[in-house]
Every structure is written in C-alpha cells, then in structure tokens.
Image (cartoon, rainbow, N blue to C red):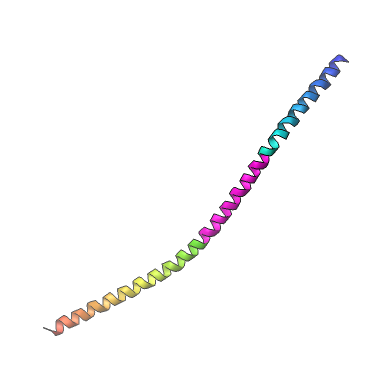
C-alpha cells in the first residue's frame, strides 16, 4: 500500500509539473502563433505587391519596346534623308 501511495504521489507530482510547464508556456505559444500569423500576412501582402509590380513592369516593357522601335525608325529615316541630301548637293 505504501508503494501505491508513493506511485500516486509521483504521478500527481509529474502531472503538476506538466501542467505548470504548459500553463507557463501558453502565453509564449500564443505569442509565437500570433507572430507566425503576422509573418504569413506580411508575405501575402508582399506577394500581392510583387504581382502588381510585375504587371506594371510588363506593361512598361511593351511601351519601352514600342518607343525604341519608333526611335529606330526615326533614326533610320534621318539616315536615309541625310544620304539623299548629301548626294543631291554634290
């Protein structure tokens, strides 16, 4: 009977220690989960902003390409005109 009482006492002490550990760490766990939630929300926000930036850059890339094509056409026309002007003046 004494061993049974010691075993129950040891089990009770172990349960008390485990409860103490979990009750003390509950705040830390909640803070950790809150931190993880904020981190995930930040990643979602950054992802949305990057998507928007990529769309803007894609549209800008088309505009820049079009501008460069026009500049190339203008300089080609100037070159041809210059060749005609200089050959006509001879």
In percent of width and height, residue 36 lies at: 62, 45
Q: Which of 40 and 27 lies nearest the eye of the viewer?
A: 27
Residue 4 against residue 30 in the figure, above or below: above
Residue furthest to the right in view is: 1
Q: Which of 63 and 22 lies nearest the eye of the viewer?
A: 22
Q: Is residue 33 magenta?
A: yes
83 relative to 8 in the view: left or right: left
In percent of width and height, residue 27 lies at: 68, 38
Q: Which of 76 and 8 lies nearest the eye of the viewer?
A: 8
Q: Residue at x 15, y 85 (%)?
A: 88
**Which quadrant: the C terminus?**
bottom left
Quadrant in the picture for residue 5: top right
Quadrant in the picture for residue 26: top right
Residue furthest to the left in view is: 90
Residue 11 against residue 66 in the figure, above or below: above
Quadrant in the picture for residue 18: top right
In percent of width and height, residue 69 lies at: 35, 73
**Which quadrant: the N terminus?**
top right
Q: Residue at x 27, y 75 (%)?
A: 75
Q: Which residues are magenta?
A: 29-51
7 relative to 55 in the view: left or right: right
In percent of width and height, residue 45 lies at: 57, 56
Residue furthest to the top in view is: 2
Q: Residue at x 53, y 59 (%)?
A: 49
Q: Residue at x 52, y 60 (%)?
A: 51
């Amino acid at each position: 009977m004494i061993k049974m009482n010691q075993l129950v006492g040891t089990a009770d002490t172990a349960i008390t220690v485990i409860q103490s550990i979990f009750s003390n760490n509950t705040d830390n766990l909640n803070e950790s989960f809150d931190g993880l939630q904020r981190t995930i929300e930040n990643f979602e926000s950054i992802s949305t902003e990057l998507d928007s930036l990529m769309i803007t850059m894609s549209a800008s890339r088309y505009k820049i390409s079009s501008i460069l094509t026009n500049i190339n056409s203008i300089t080609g026309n100037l070159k041809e005109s210059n060749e005609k002007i200089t050959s006509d003046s001879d």
